[in-house]
Image (spheres, rainbow, N blue to C red):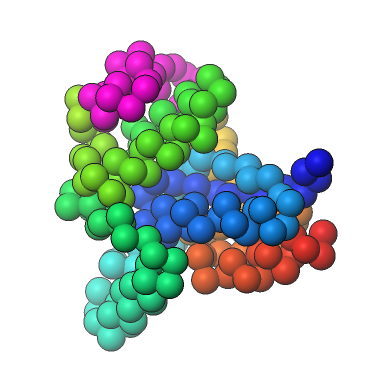
Amino acid sequence: MVTKALELIFDFGSPNAYLTLKVLPELLDRTDAELIITPCLLGGIFKATGNKAPMVQYAEAPAKMAYENLEMRRFIDKHGLTRFRLNPHFPVNTLLIMRGAIVAEDEGVLDDYVDAVNRAMWEEGVKMDDPEAAAAFLTANGFDGPALLARTQEPDIKAKLVANTEAAVARGVFGIPTFFVGDQMFFGKDRLAQVEEALVAS
C-alpha cells in the first residue's frame, strides 16, 4: 500500500522536467511512493520570483551555459534517454497546454496527458503553442483535442492554474522541476538522490 507522496511542481516548458519524469518510475518503485503532479505556469513562477530561464540568466556567462548543457547531456547519457530532442520551437509558450493539464486533471487523465504532451514537446518537436498543432497531436494520441482545448478557456480552469502557480510561489518555488516530500523542497533533476533519501526517511 502506497503511503508516501512525492509532489512534482510541473510545466512542460522545462526540458529537465521531461528528463526527470523519465527516470522517476524506478525511484518511485524503490521508495514505494506515489507521484502527484501539480501543474503550474513556469512563466508565472519566473515573473513572481524574479528568476529567469538559464538561457537568459547565463546569456553573458557562456561557460556557465556550456556547463549546464554538459550536465544535461551527462544525465541523458547516464539514463539512456535517446528520444530526447530540444524542441526546434523552444521556448514554447506553455499557457495553452498547461491549462490543458488542468482540464486533463479534472477529467482524470492527467498522467496520460503529461506523457503525450511531453512526447510532443521533447521527442517529436511539435509547436504546442499553436492551437491547431496541439489539437491535432492530442487527437492523434487518444484525446478529443478540440474539446479538451476548448475547455482551457473556462474561467475555473484558468483560475485553477493561477491558484496552483501562486500557491507554489508561496511555498518557495522559483523554478521547475521542484519536488516536495512533505514540507521539504528540492529543486532540479540533480537533487533526485536527496529526494530519494527524504522518501526513505519519511
Q: Residue at position x 50%, y 42% from top?
A: 40
Point out the stretch of residues depicted in magenta: 134-158
Q: Which quadrant, please, contains the N terminus?
A: top right
- Front one among 25 and 111: 25
Q: In the image, is residue 130 above or below residue 196?
A: above
Q: Residue furthest bottom?
A: 63
> What secondary structure do most residues of the magenta stretch adopt?
helix
Of residues 113 and 101, the one nearer the viewer is 113
Q: Is residue 121 above or below residue 80?
A: above
- Let me know if residue 152 is in the magenta part: yes
The spot of residue 150 in percent (x, y) is: 35, 16
Looking at the image, the residue that sits furthest to the left is 88
The location of residue 116, given as percent across then percent down, is 38, 36
Seen from this angle, which residue lies furthest top? Answer: 147
Which quadrant: the C terminus?
bottom right
Report if residue 171 is visible in the image.
no
- Count all numbered tags in the image, as a single digit: 0
Q: Is residue 152 toward the left or the right of residue 133 in the image?
A: right
Position of residue 95 measured from the top left corner of the image (x, y, whole percent) = 36, 37
Q: Does the rendering let one see residue 130? A: yes
Q: Considering depth in this image, is 126 or 14 the residue closer to the camera? A: 126
Name the residue located 74 percent from the left edge and 51 percent from the top edge: 32
- Residue drawn at x 56%, y 23% is 108
